[in-house]
Image (cartoon, rainbow, N blue to C red):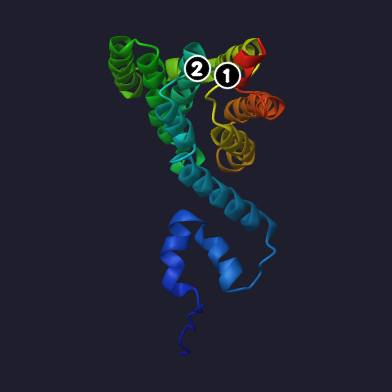
Amino acid sequence: MAEEVVETSFMDPFKDILVNYLMPEKCYDEFFLQFNLLHVDCLKIVISKGLGIGIILGSVLVKLPQILKLIGAKSAEGLSFNSVLLELFAITGTMAYSIANSFPFSSWGEALFLMLQTVTIGFLIQHYGGNTIKGLGFLAVYCGLLAVVLSPVTPVSVVTTMQASNMPAIIFGRLIQAGTNYRNGHTGQLSAISVFLLFAGSLARIFTTVQETGDSLMAVTYIISSFCNGVIAAQVLYYWNSSPVLRKKTE
């Protein structure tokens, strides 16, 4: 009786990592055993997973430049707290909806880190506006509401409604910030790095959402988010040479 031949690959030492985080085992076999590197379906999966992981890693620091800029200037001039609240609502809705539907972490993980950073920015806006107590109250209320939304007490229908409400929340949130920029004639302490990273991340999320979840509600949300982030990015470029100091000198 002939012994069964087990195919091996030079990538076998990394197989567990690749299969667990980047591709299913059938794609590992296609790439590294059959050397079919142009397998379309597997390429889509790998690109989507890679983008998802990259977005999550980038999201850890995406708003750090904004936070550091606020702390360095000791001012939150040009940033709208209402816009931050609406953005936080949208981020929380996406996170809760994804957890409720058991979507893979690679398809929504950045929402967790964006939420932490956005909450920090919200507090700093209040703190540098002379309302530190109000900022602490904001943190306490948000943490309480988050615990309720993520708990089994909250029906899936409520979470789905939150996700559906993301679209108007994103639109109004970005319109408020865009309006603030227009009225001020500059973007104030808005960080260009954070704005452009958010724009790029939301564009990439359109592809990864379609590929990994197939959820049309989330896909449309990211399409709208990309457009709105693009508007803010365009304003950053338009007002590039404007600043609060220069604006005051010309008035």
Task: Please name whichever residue, 153 or 240, is drawn nearer the observer in this view of the structure.
Answer: 240
Horizontal and vertical percent for residue 231?
68, 24
Looking at the figure, which quarter contains the C terminus? top right
- Which residue carries the number 1 mark? 244
- The image quadrant of residue 137 is top left
- The image quadrant of residue 219 is top right
Residue type at mark 1: give it: Pro
Mark 1: give few (<14), some (14-19) or many (20+) Cα within 10 Å. some
Residue at 46 percent of width and 46 percent of height: 57
Residue at 49 percent of width and 38 percent of height: 62
- Which residue carries the number 2 mark? 77
Task: Please name whichever residue, 151 or 6, is drawn nearer the observer in this view of the structure.
Answer: 151
| Position above or below: 251 against 11 | above
Residue type at mark 2: give it: Glu
- The answer to whether residue 139 is left or right of residue 195 is left
Horizontal and vertical percent for residue 91?
47, 25
| Position above or below: 98 against 184 | below
- The image quadrant of residue 214 is top right
Which of discs 1 and 2 lies nearer the camera? The answer is 1
- Does residue 191 appear anywhere in the picture? yes
